[in-house]
Image (tube, grey):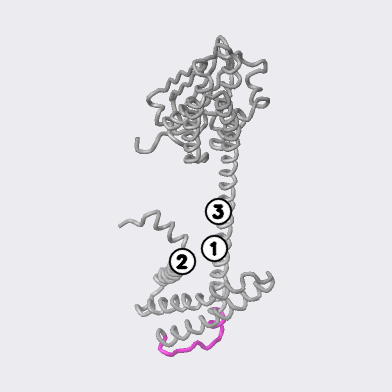
Amino acid sequence: MQFKLSQWRGLLDDRNRFFWVLQGVGWSGYALVHYIGSLMHEMRDIYVLILLLGAYAGFLLTVPLRYLYRRIWDVRPWQLVLIVLSSAYCSAVTWAVIDNATYWEIYKFGFRPESNWFYFKNSLAKFYIMLSWSGLYFGIKYYQMLQDEKQKALVATSMAHQAQLKMLRYQLNPHFLFNTLNAISTLILVKENELANRMMSKLSLFLRFSLDNEPIKKIPLDRELDALKLYLDIEKVRFDERLRVNIDIEDKARNALVPSLILQPLIENSIKYAIARMEEGGEVVVKARVIGDDLVLSLSDNGPGSKIPPQELVKSGGVGLANTRDRLEALYGKNYSFTLSSNEPTGLCIDIRIPWEQVEGL
């Protein structure tokens, strides 16, 4: 059975298990390298046991170093260096004694060299190995700490990003809520209680939709249109036949993912600056098309237009246009477009182009 990627990730996340795996693999590799080196010389089969005993001794002697290094992690640098050198040297000498004993007693049958140079050279080699092990331990530990800090920074950035999106989305709701409640208050004053009740009911459904859909999440365009229709039902109570809406959505675009309530503030702008200023009312047209790998949303009205050049309206206009652009930038980076242009023969046209992401499973 193949080792799954999730299992590898679980291994890396479990620091204790990861240490023991590296410890086992590292010392097995040490024994294997020495065994391959011994093939160049004529060695008896018993030498394999000597290699295994040496690797096992190194394995055992480095385990206490791990716990020692954990305890001295936060000491001053010069103290850290001193403790590492001394502990590595003591471990190396101990390892060399064990290694020499097994080699001369088991392999050489009790024979001893006439010079102590062999012992010194073996101890020095073991000291270098222990220092290398210590360097790898600290290197891996520092790398894991850097990864932890990087992960924390990513989480903090993500939380800030989510907070920004929520702020941009929820900043629109009080503006819309104020207008709607003001209209309901006016209806009550003129004794239009039935209309006021209908308007309050639609407002309740719209606010529930708004609360149920996080601004950091994307929803299918069909659900976005349902919310838009709730909003338009509220506005039609105010404007009646003066507000005409034409929604033209390509079938392929209906399952496309879009930011929740991305269209409502744009429609609200059209109603406020176009429909409300025309005695005979006007028409708002909403279109959606899939073009290549992009979803193109288009919203236009036949109002009087603006004396300000369309592209400057985002800076000089109300909250709706600027917040919509900022939300798109926060969600898609540079991979979007938000353009305003004059509609023909009159009015304003807003085009949004975002990557086409389809609902999973469809």
Image coordinates of residue 9 in percent, x first then y, are 44, 57
Image coordinates of residue 44 in percent, x first then y, are 36, 78
For this rendering, which residue is in front, 48 or 231?
Answer: 231
Picture quadrant where residue 305 is located? top right
Residue 294 in view here: no
Which disc number belongs to residue 140? 1
Image coordinates of residue 211 in percent, x first then y, are 50, 40
N-term-proximal mark, 1 vs 2:
2
Q: Badge 1: how crowded within 10 Å, few (<14), some, or many (20+)?
A: few
Q: Residue furthest front?
A: 191
N-term-proximal mark, 3 vs 1:
1
According to the picture, the residue beneath numbered tag 3 turns out to be 151
Can you say which quadrant of the picture contains the C terminus? top left
- Residue type beneath disc 2: Leu
Q: Which residues are magenta?
A: 108-121
Dominant SS of magenta comes to: loop
Q: CA distance from mark 3 to mark 1?
A: 16 Å
- Residue type beneath disc 3: Gln
According to the picture, the residue beneath numbered tag 2 turns out to be 22
Q: Badge 2: how crowded within 10 Å, few (<14), some, or many (20+)?
A: few
N-term-proximal mark, 3 vs 2:
2
